[in-house]
Image (spheres, helix red, strand yellow):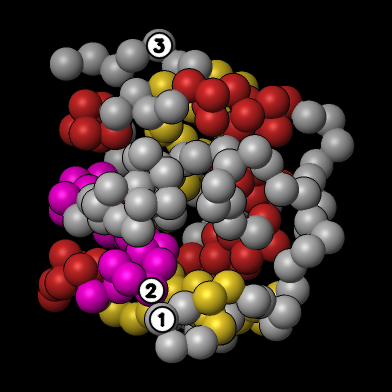
Amino acid sequence: MSLPKPYYEIDGLVIYHADCREILPDLPQVDLVLTDPPYGVNKAIWDISFPDWVIPLCFNLTESVAVMPGIWALRRCLEAFGNNYRWTLCGHILNGMTHGAIGFCNWIPCVVGGVIKHGGQDAFDFSVGSDYKPDHPSPKPLVFMKWLINRLSEKKQIILDPFMGSGTTLVAAKELGRKAIGIEIEERYCEIAAKRLSQQVFDFG
């Protein structure tokens, strides 16, 4: 099966409007998969279950995989990584007020596996509230995505996000001089991501 025509493509940034299961087997090798998939907490119609099936598909495309499973799917994510698991990075939200099962949740886990860039901290402190928020129920802060990309990759490398959402991974990659591929099943999020990438003024925050 050949790849579909990109929804958006410019300067090494590519968006596919597709189900990632259908096109991941046909993608070329990349340097890093960094993705924030559904957690399985019914936050939206697409958030029915955590897609642990995607992790072995990602390891077919790269030696370096980073997945943000939320708190509820953390155990399933670790099980899916198996012997490829290396560590868990953390985004610490200094002013976070999200309710968790036993109190406020102030951190974002990012499970990393395979061949991971050595050196640097495993946690990043940041605040939320003033940065740009795209029309998406669960966007990740741009500042945290930029930290992850810098922590896990080098300039000019290719980043893949098979659950692109509103495109924050690709925006961060663009600002940091990486190439990136995003896959998203909902066209309205592809449109949001394409508009963000085509902006002449970057989203700061």
For the point 78% across and 29% down, which residue is it?
199
Q: Nearer the viewer, mark 2 or mark 3?
A: 2
Q: Earlier in the sequence, mark 3 or mark 1?
A: 3
For the point 58% across and 42% down, which residue is it?
136
Residue type, mark 2 in image: Ile
Residue 174 pos. (x, y %): 66, 42
Residue 14 pos. (x, y %): 51, 27
In which quarter of the view is residue 2 placed? top left
Q: Which mark is residue 71?
A: 2
- Residue 93's place in the image compared with 177, above or below, is below
Q: Which mark is residue 101?
A: 1
Task: State the residue in front, 78 or 158.
Answer: 78
Q: Quadrant of the C terminus?
A: bottom right
Answer whether labels 2 and 3 touch (C-beta < 8 Å): no
Secondary structure at badge 1 equals loop
Q: Earlier in the sequence, mark 2 or mark 1?
A: 2
Q: Which mark is residue 5?
A: 3
Residue type, mark 1 in image: Ala
Q: Which residues are magenta?
A: 53-75
Q: Quadrant of the N terminus?
A: top left
